[in-house]
Amino acid sequence: MRVLVIDDEADISEIVRLTFGLRWPEAEVLSVATGEAGVEAASSLSPDLILLDVGLPDIDGFEVCERIRAISDVPIVMLTARHEEVDKVRGLELGADDYVTKPFSHIELLARVRAVLRRAESQAPTREGPPLYIDYESRTVTVDGQEVKLTPIEYGLLYHLTRNENRVLTFRTLLAKVWGREYMDETDYLKVHIQHLRRKLGDDPQGEAMIVNERGVGYKFVRRSAAVTSKVTR
């Protein structure tokens, strides 16, 4: 497991390193001291977990969280000395998975991290029944028992939409996740590939659709009257 700590306090990084050493000795703990470096590290290092401080010397943790969420689903636990409820709500609304207030004990941190990782492992749909079945391990997609051949782009879109069921992913978020951040303004790319994906899935945007367009915002995946089955291996 690779853990990224974005915090300008060296003591916090050391506490995290010692804490993870007790529970996950094989864990690799990496640390950066600025928000900009954190966004870059989140993109280039592909961490399994991010511990993110709110009070950073360049850009605050809320902006860092929002920018990371545009490119990654990695679990994020925010760290802060603030106690105000509004800060916690803001962090969660921007995509953070949990919030730990400084000072914290290693027991509390481990408990929060275990809970966040458990939720991350169970994010994908696990319901039974047709029409759509996704095996995330083999990247196999079947509709009504028939395998559907998707391009890498189409599978990427379906993967991120189903992993965030009932949650609207903005156009820019989907473009960043599937194409890369340099394509975040190319909404025409996205619309064309969504059309192709819908056609292959037999999805009807005029009827009971699985991929729903939130006009002017983005797309979300919702289950039809028949459920979605998936198989996840982590």
Image (tube, rainbow, N blue to C red):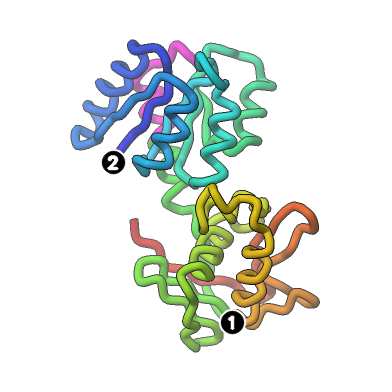
Question: Residue at coordinates 53% horizontally, 70% vertically from top-left?
Answer: 154
Mark 2 or mark 1: name the one nearer the start of the chain.
2
Residue 167 can be seen, yes or no: no
Question: Residue at coordinates 50% horizontally, 59% vertically from top-left?
Answer: 124
Q: Which residues are magenta?
A: 101-113
Judging depth in this view, the residue of 141 and 112 nearest the camera is: 141
Judging depth in this view, the residue of 115 and 182 nearest the camera is: 182
Q: Is residue 112 left or right of residue 164?
A: left
Where is residue 202 drawn, in percent x and y?
Answer: 64, 83
Q: Is residue 217 left or right of residue 82?
A: right
Where is residue 162 drawn, in percent x and y?
Answer: 56, 62
| Location of the C terminus (image quadrant) | bottom left
| Mark linked to residue 161 | none
Question: Quadrant of the rendered structure where residue 138 is?
Answer: bottom left
Q: Is residue 233 magenta?
A: no
Question: Residue at coordinates 62% horizontally, 36% vertically from top-left?
Answer: 94
Q: CA distance from mark 2 to mark 1?
A: 36 Å
Q: Is residue 72 left or right of residue 202?
A: left
Residue indicated by mark 1: 200
